[in-house]
Amino acid sequence: MRSKKTLTILIMVLVFSLLMMGCGKPNKNSGSNPNPAKPPVDQPAEPQEPEEPEEPALPTTTTARTAYPLSSADEDYLVLVNKKFHVTENYKADDLVTVTTCDPDVGNKETKMMRKTAADAFEVLAAASREDGYNIVMRTGYRSYNYQKSLFDSYAAKHGEAEANTYSAKPGQSEHQTGWCCDVGVRGRGLTSFNGSKEAEWIANNSWKYGFILRYPADKTDITGYIYESWHIRYVGLEVAAYMYENNLTLEEYLGMVD
Ligand SMILES: [Zn+2]
């Protein structure tokens, strides 16, 4: 008896549910519709939100950069500038400051500058080198597009454009314009004699501790596109510099931007 009663209740519930489903949508043709013969007009579709214009594709460098764990919100210091990725002619960072520990006989007031974060890091590096018995100074930091142009043109006039481009960047292709790098040396000594010096060895072994990398290593010329430069260091921040040093990576490799 009990199960029969339960079955009856279940059937009642089912019938009630079916009835309710039928009531789900009000019948437009029922009730006081004055024109019942007229077929129901399809409701116009909900007005569509205007489609957002597609975001312009981010430069591939930015995409690559976001793949790395960065501890700072300021990613500028990982900007890739090389023969493929250029800086616009008018670009100039707005936080360039004068580096104190520099060779006063090289360049001009402007080339003694770097972006503040890099300049501060370089002062720490220079002080550390003094503690170790080396007087490493900055020779050239920031270079404007026009400064780089006159530099490259003078090399090209002497050695031809192709050869000049193995050791000097064309305007817009120099990371010196970013303010994140510098050429180092010893006061009164030329750049090329820095190669093989004990100071160059110190730079190669220690600059990562201060957030710098050797940007154009001897064994990576096919990747960087430039000959070995023991003097050119690039700020990439402490964390990335340590990682790149440990794994023997160029900036192109770190950013995954090798052809
Ligand atoms: Zn340089």
Image (cartoon, grey):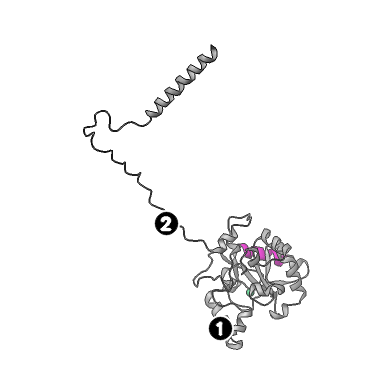
In front of the other: 53 or 237: 53
Q: Is residue 28 above or below residue 138?
A: above
| Quadrant position of residue 174 | bottom right
Under circle 2, the secondary element is loop
Which amino acid, by three-letter code, is at mark 1?
Asp
Give the dominant element type of the magenta stretch: helix, strand or loop.
helix
Q: For the magenta stretch, what is the residue range?
A: 117-127
Residue 187: image tag: none
Q: Residues within 10 Å of mark 1 (few under 14, many from 20)?
A: some
- Left or right of 213 on screen, residue 82: left
Q: Residue furthest bottom?
A: 158
| Quadrant position of residue 19 | top left
Q: Residue furthest top?
A: 1
In front of the other: 89 or 50: 50
In front of the other: 17 or 54: 17
Q: Which residue has dot 2 on it? A: 53
> Magenta stretch containing residue 84, yes or no?
no
Q: Which residue has dot 1 on it? A: 153
- Left or right of 148 on screen, residue 249: right
- Which quarter is ligand 1 in? bottom right
Q: Is residue 257 above or below residue 38?
A: below
Q: Residue at horizontal 61%, vertical 57%?
A: 67
Which amino acid, by three-letter code, is at mark 2?
Pro
Q: How far is the residue under mark 1 from the one under mark 2?
A: 43 Å
| Quadrant position of residue 178 | bottom right
Q: Residues within 10 Å of mark 2 (few under 14, many from 20)?
A: few
Under circle 1, the secondary element is helix
**Which quadrant does the C terminus fall into?**
bottom right
Q: Residue at horizontal 53%, vertical 70%?
A: 87
Q: Position of residue 33 (x, y in %)?
A: 24, 31
Q: Position of residue 194 (x, y in %)?
A: 72, 77
Task: Point out the tag, 1 or 2, that comes first from the N-terminus.
Answer: 2
